[in-house]
Image (spheres, grey):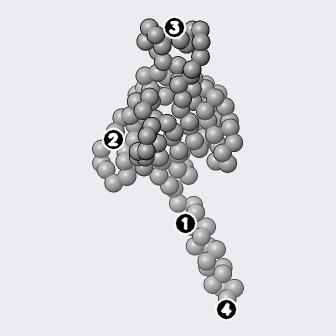
Amino acid sequence: MASAYKHHYKRLINAISSLPTLDKVILHGTKIISGDVRKSDRSIFKSAYGIPFDQVKTIKIGIIRSKGIFLVKSVFTIGRPIALDLYDIHGSYIKGVEGHPDGIIRIQPAGSPDFIDIPIFQIEEIVYGKYN
C-alpha cells in the first residue's frame, strides 16, 4: 500500500516540477518584478549572433568599467558599454557579450494585463523561468 502512495507522490512531484515558472527582472536596489519577459523592439543584445538562447537561464548586467575607448564613449554619451554575462540552469558561466546601450526589457508583471518597459541600465539581473 505504501509503495502505491510513493508512486503517486513521485508522479505528482514530476508534474509540478514540469510546470513553467515566472521570469524575474531584478532591478538595482531591492525591487524584483516577476512575470513574463517579452521581446522588445530594442533588444538588450548588441548582436544576437552565437548566443545559445535555449541554454540561458540568467543574464547578469553590468556597466563595463574600462579605460580607453569605452571611457571616451561614456564621456561623449556615444553609448555606454554594457556587459551581459550569460549563465545556464546550473549557474555555470556560458559567455559574455556586449549589450545594447539603448536596450529595453519588456515584461508583463504577473496578474497585470499591461507591459512595462525597463531600460537596461535599471536592471541588475534577468532570471528566466523554466521555459524561456
Q: Distance from label 3 to label 4 (Cα)?
A: 72 Å
Report which residue position mark 4 lands on.
1
Give the answer, above or below, for where 1 lies relative to 103. Answer: below
Q: Nearer the viewer, mark 2 or mark 3?
A: 3
In-front residue for pair 128/81: 81
Q: Distance from label 4 to label 1 (Cα)?
A: 23 Å
Q: Position of residue 8 (x, y in %)?
A: 61, 79
In-front residue for pair 73/11: 73
Q: Earlier in the sequence, mark 3 or mark 1?
A: 1
Residues at discs 2 and 1 in contact (Cβ within 8 Å): no
**Could you tell me the amino acid type at mark 3?**
Val
Residue at position x 50%, y 55% in the image: 21
Q: Position of residue 77 (x, y in %)?
A: 43, 12
Report which residue position mark 2 lands on.
115
Residue at position x 61%, y 26% in the image: 97
Q: Earlier in the sequence, mark 2 or mark 3?
A: 3
Indicate which disc residue 16 carries: 1
Residues at discs 2 and 3 in contact (Cβ within 8 Å): no
Q: Earlier in the sequence, mark 4 or mark 1?
A: 4
Q: Earlier in the sequence, mark 4 or mark 2?
A: 4
Q: Position of residue 46 (x, y in %)?
A: 53, 22
Q: Distance from label 4 to label 2 (Cα)?
A: 50 Å
